[in-house]
Image: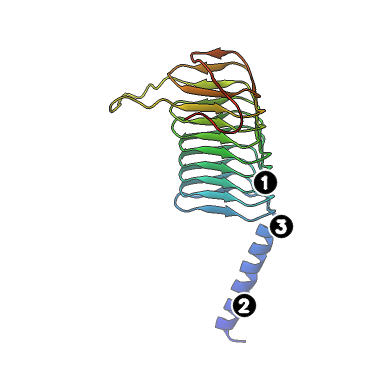
Amino acid sequence: MNRLVLALLLGLAFVGAAQARHDANDDLDIDKVNGSIHVPDNATVGKLSTVNGGIRIGANAHAKAAETVNGGIDVEDGASVDSLETVNGGLHIGAKVKVAKTVEAVNGGITLGQGADVAGHASNVNGGIKLDAAHVGGGIETVSGDITIGADSRVEGGVLVNEDHSWFRMGSSRKPRVVIGPHAKVDGKLTFKRDVDLYVSDSATIGPVEGATPTKFSGDQVPK
């Protein structure tokens, strides 16, 4: 066997062995600067981190923390993760996803699908927060985003719409719109440190309200 063929075979063997070790150790951290991260369905990985790129966690997969700066994070149905964090990008959390800790964004919306469960808080600065028959155990916080706590959703720890401390504003800022849907339940205080439009279903249950006057509505149609 000539030396070139031997070298190629040894190289292939090394790559195969490395891949086998990688596949056997499925609790690996993935860290990038440029590029997206995709975790296959049903896989188990460690911490996911990128600077410029999105992150997708497949259905029924498990990851530890998932963090990005410029990019969104999608967590598919049935997956589980310890925490999610992004700066510029939205967070889409599918049905029956379990988040053991917190969900945080700065400039980006947060959506929780049916049966999604976040044990800690869900917070952002700019961007809507929407729950579809989902649960948040540590409260919801935003500054400029709309909040929709949809039908049959549950929130413990209250709701906070904070003051806008941004140093630059152009014209009058729009009032956030907060909707508490049919049969939804919010335990804890609803605190509004800026003007909001607050709509509460007559079948919802909420805690004390500070800083806003609720407008009641019936059925599924929220007043415009």
Q: Choose between 194 and 17: the one closer to the eye.
A: 194
Instruction: Identify residue type, mark 3.
Output: Ala
In percent of width and height, residue 81 lies at 65, 41
**Residue at the disc numbered 3:** 24
SS at circle 1: loop
Badge 3 density bin: few <14, some 14–19, many ≥20, Cα 10 Å:
few
SS at circle 3: helix
In percent of width and height, residue 102 lies at 60, 32
Residue at x 63%, y 50% (from the top left corner): 28
Image quarter of residue 135: top right
First in residue order: circle 2 vs circle 3:
2
First in residue order: circle 1 vs circle 3:
3
**Residue at the disc numbered 1:** 79
Q: Give the spatial CA distance, label 2 vs label 1.
A: 39 Å
SS at circle 2: helix
- Label 2 vs label 3, nearer the camera: 3
First in residue order: circle 2 vs circle 1:
2
Q: Give the spatial CA distance, label 2 vs label 3.
A: 22 Å
Instruction: Identify residue type, mark 2.
Output: Leu
Q: Which residue lies furthest to the left in this view?
A: 170
**Residue at the disc numbered 2:** 9
Residue at x 61%, y 73% (from the top left corner): 12
Image quarter of residue 181: top right
Badge 2 density bin: few <14, some 14–19, many ≥20, Cα 10 Å:
few
- Label 1 vs label 3, nearer the camera: 1
Residue at x 62%, y 25% (from the top left corner): 138
